[in-house]
Image: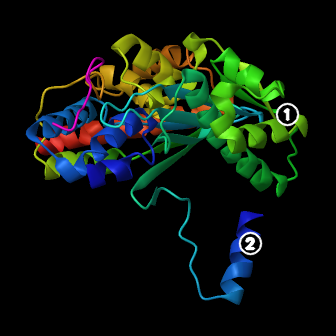
Amino acid sequence: MIGSLLYLTASRPDIVFAVGLCARFQTCAKEYHLTAVKRIFRYLVGTADLGLWYRKYSGFDLVGYCNVDYAGDKVERKSTSGSCQFLGQALIEWSCRKQNTIALSTNEAEYVSAASCCSQVLWIRNQLEDYSLRYTSVPIFCDNTSAINLSKNPIQHSRSKHIEIKQHFIRDHVQKKDIALSFVDTENQLADIFTKPLVEDRFNFLKEKLSIMKNPNKDLSLITNDIKLIPLTLSDSIQMDQSQSECSYDQNVHQNVHQDRIFIKFRTFKTRILGQ
Amino acid sequence: MCEEFSNLMQSEIEMNMMGELVFFLGLQIKQHPNGIFISQEKYVKDILKKYKMNEAKIMVTPIHPSSRLDKD
């Protein structure tokens, strides 16, 4: 069950955290864990048609978000780091990982997460160089100010001595202006969805921000569904024109959609008769 | 440009032009005039059927907000 869900995470960042959490208990699975997995399936029943929507002309600004759930793992008390990277408005990479080390403070956990996000950003940056897109100071958004300060301030803190390598790694790249750690408030921290269980409102808000949605073309067909019982007449096409004026497509597309719709309508009409 | 490329490839190696990409490794790809939509709708329905969950009650989030999974 977990395996098939893990494959699904390829297009469904909304279930990454839940699946990842369940996957941790595979070696000692209990009935309790099966209930959790079944809940994911029940969520999928209602949201089977969700997917990732990549808008055209959404720009090429590379940004990263990183977040952490401090000591989120109740067994070993390790933190969970979540990160996602955007190219313009398009979500291109996301991850949810239990950290390898046990963090002593939120600051440290946040820093470890920022370091892994940073290495991802650097990789994406290198890849994009092939398309002659060059970036300096790629912003990585983090909701912990002390982690940001730690990346600027060269003072050795007694609390962060043991994460020295990661500290130097980020600081080095900040100084080279490869990346820049910037602050974002928790409200707009988009990587939240990858680190902790959320309530419905917040979950849906983040889903929308990550452009996880239903097929936008289907929304158009929804309009036709309403009037599919009416036989095809002239007045009918006028009605459709009115519904189209609400959509924000250019005229050419309009006409194509229009033809498609008549076709769809005709087909449903035909199957209706044939079926009966 | 696409056709030129496809002709070049076909002349070099034995391969066919299959048209626009719609289905690849279980990913359904829909190309719209204003963007691309990627989903796994069919795969979701398949696994729901496989585990006999397609009639289950609908949940709004995949995990309970206050749930803390533990070892036992």
Does residue A135 appear left or right of residue A238 in this picture?
right
Q: Residue at x 25, y 23 (%)?
A: B67
Please say whether residue A169 is visible from this viewpoint.
Answer: yes
Q: Position of residue A23 (x, y in %)?
A: 30, 46
Mark 2 nearby-residue class (10 Å; few <14, some 14–19, many ≥20): few
Q: Position of residue A111 (x, y in %)?
A: 64, 31
Amino acid carrying label 2: it is: Phe
Q: Position of residue A2 (x, y in %)?
A: 26, 50
Label number found at residue B5: 2
B70 magenta-colored: yes
Q: Is residue A186 above or below residue A34?
A: above
Q: Secondary structure at mark 1?
A: loop
In the rendered image, which quarter is residue B39 located in?
A: top left
Q: Secondary structure at mark 2?
A: helix
Disc 1 and disc 2 on one polypeptide chain: no
Does residue B26 appear left or right of residue A191 in this picture?
left
Q: Residue at x 62, y 20 (%)?
A: A248
Badge 1: chain ID: A
Q: Residue at x 88, y 37 (%)?
A: A136
A122 magenta-colored: no
Badge 2: chain ID: B
Does residue B63 appear left or right of residue A167 in this picture?
left
Where are the magenta residues, as a range? B64-72
Comparing marks 1 and 2, which lies closer to the viewer?
1
Amino acid carrying label 1: it is: Ser
Q: Position of residue B30 (x, y in %)?
A: 50, 46
In the rendered image, which quarter is residue A16 located in?
A: top left
Please say whether residue A85 is visible from this viewpoint.
Answer: no
Q: Is residue A265 above or below residue A152?
A: below
Which quadrant does the C terminus of chain A fall into? top left
Residue that carries the numbered disc 1 in the rendered image: A137
